[in-house]
Image (cartoon, rainbow, N blue to C red):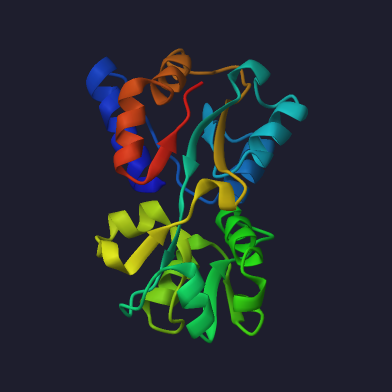
Amino acid sequence: FVGVAEQLAASFTDKTGVPIRLLMGSTGLLYAQITQGAPIDLFLAADTKRPQALVAQNLGIGQSYAIYTRGRLVLWVPGGEDADPAVFLTAADSVALANPLLAPYGRAASDVLARFPTHSANLRIVRGQNISATFAQIASGAVPGGFVALSQVLAQGIPREQYSVMPEDWHQPIEQAMVVIKHQNLHPAVQSFREFLLSEKASVMLSTQGYEAVGG
């Protein structure tokens, strides 16, 4: 989400003149930093679990919690074979996905595999620690194909014939939530930036980058 966040922040700054300082990191790492008192105003997570946990711990403002986007899952087969899951999962000997215990995209990929039990019964499952690691495994040729984010294949200019977008009703939603963090020196513009992230302009930017905007 780094590239998209940079574009959204730049657009907000152009509109308001207020600069946004982005602190990049994994959702788990940023969550840990916030619980230790890091001076963060707004937490944009890759899941809903950690923002909800911050609200439960009275570290996040409950009224500010919102799902700001949903990711889309794709099956990427760079070798040019049919990226239809029924075809690929029958012919391939292995498939890559992010660790379902750690990554929302991994959990979604597991849901898709469960729809094809006879196809995937003999597959070797290669689990990356996160979606970036999974993308790298496929790009290197170590695995013939696997499940990654639509935002990744769009950002890398992957040819359309090499991937297929999984229907949303095939897996649990890949929801990303945000929450305003409670602290004494909260920036006065944080609410405006939160509202911007739920605006129509942000929605258009998200959709062009492989995400689905959901509004407030």
Q: Residue furthest right?
A: 57
Which residue is more in the foreground, 89 or 139?
89
Residue 206 in which image quadrant: top left
Residue 78 visible here: yes
**Residue 140 picture location, percent across and down:** 38, 80
Q: Is residue 84 above or below residue 166?
A: below
Which residue is more in the foreground, 78 or 90?
90
**Residue 144 picture location, percent across and down:** 43, 81
Residue 158 visible here: no
* Side of 141 relative to 175 (left or right): left
Q: Residue at x 45, y 41 (%)?
A: 23
Total number of numbered discs in the rendering: 0
Q: Is residue 69 above or below residue 128?
A: above
**Residue 101 picture location, percent across and down:** 69, 60
Q: Is residue 156 above or below residue 207?
A: below
Q: Residue at x 61, y 67 (%)?
A: 113
* Side of 98 relative to 156 (left or right): right
Q: Residue furthest top?
A: 188
Q: Residue at x 34, y 28 (%)?
A: 202
Residue 207 in which image quadrant: top left
**Residue 11 picture location, percent across and down:** 26, 28
Q: Is residue 68 above or below residue 153?
A: above
